[in-house]
Image: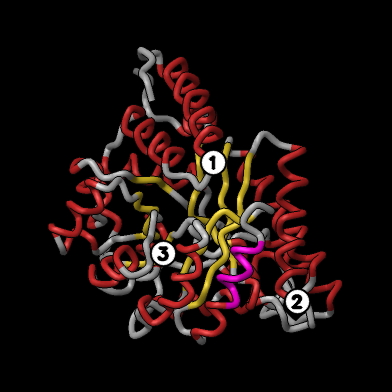
Amino acid sequence: MKPVRRDFLLELPKPELHCHLDGSLRIETILDLAQKGKIELPATDAESLHKAVVVQGRVKTLEEYLDKFQITLSVLQTPEALERVAFELAQDAAAENVRHLEVRYSPILHLEQGMTPMESLDAVIRGLRTAEHEFNISTGVIICGIRNFSIESSIELAELAIAYKYRGVVGYDLAGAEENFPAKDHLEAFYLIRNNNVNVTLHAGEAYGPQSIHQAIHYCGANRIGHGTRLREDGDLMNYVNDHRICLEICLTSNFQTGSIENIKSHPLKFYHDYGLRISLNTDNRLISGVSLVDEYMLAHKTFNFNMLDFKDFIISGFKSAFLEHRERTKLIKEVAHTIDDYLGVGSHKY
């Protein structure tokens, strides 16, 4: 079997299910958008801005990590800016051979200059659609409600997700500060979402315990869990997640940066994998966490000694859990599985 090397991982077709639009800009794009929009930044050269916006080491709280987004959001208040960064994000992902990318963002964070949520969403979808035509990638948008915002805003965003269900939106999420802002407070929004057959993924078990994951699944109907680093604290719930094949969207680097784990070696990723949980690897925020998807795979290899067959499991699990129509997902899985089998020189399997 081939050894784990960066060039091999780069060539493998991969999914990315947990990637924030407003955390994944290019530094050069921020500078350009700021200049065009006469927007003040904490720095005006690439090196200094990089130090200001990319997390150095780790932060004290999740909220401190989220503060970095004030810089990126300041330049994302026009349809032109959103369309551009959506296109560039898909382009960057395609350069790593990401075959399916799900981009999450919250339209209500982009209204400071009078843009409507619909105009915002249309712009993001346009950017992604253009990238799909130019690169070998499929995309979808996940709309994020914000835990620490009003229930009314979550309902409005849920209604928007439903309206765009067949027009580029593939799911609904709840992001933002986790501790002291329980998901069940947003139950009315999720009632709308589930009753209109919209996919659900929730940030849970990152800055709060397994009860947050319990709420995400049993109150909100989550099909996937964003992060889930504290799931191991509740063995019974972990068995439920495993039995129901609820995918954990793992983001190693950002989990360390936000303090949800003490160090990379203490991350439960290997335990989860050995236990049989369905897992995908993701960047979370390509710019703010300073990572690419291949970086995350290499970090997992160096930390836990995962081999190429382990990464095959992660990749197939990610595609199986993607918010795609069943026929499209099955077709993609078969294509990708055979590609990986041929590449690794192992026998083909039925997926």
For mark 2, give the secondary structure.
Answer: loop
* Residue 116 disc label: 2
- What separation in Å lies between label 2 and label 1 (alpha carbons)? 29 Å
Above or below residue 341? Residue 137 is below
For mark 3, give the secondary structure.
Answer: strand
Q: Amino acid at mark 1?
A: Glu
Question: What residue lies at 40% left-to-right and 57% top-to-bottom?
Answer: 253
Q: Earlier in the sequence, mark 2 or mark 1?
A: 2
Task: Specify the quadrant that holds the C terminus.
Answer: top left
Asked whether disc 3 touches disc 2, contact meaning CB atoms under 8 Å apart, the reply is no
Please identify the quarter of the rendering in which residue 228 is found: bottom left
Q: Earlier in the sequence, mark 3 or mark 2?
A: 2
Question: What residue lies at 22% left-to-right and 41% top-to-bottom?
Answer: 276
Q: Amino acid at mark 2?
A: Thr
Above or below residue 13? Residue 295 is below
Depth order, front residue of 205/264: 205
Q: How is the image coloured?
A: secondary structure
Q: Which residue is mark 3?
A: 202
Q: Is residue 150 magenta?
A: no
Question: What residue lies at 60% left-to-right and 71% top-to-bottom?
Answer: 159
* Residue 325 disc label: 1
Q: Residue 4, image x and y in percent?
A: 38, 29
Please state the extent of the stretch shown in magenta in the rendering.
156-163
Above or below residue 165? Residue 186 is below
Q: Amino acid at mark 3?
A: Leu
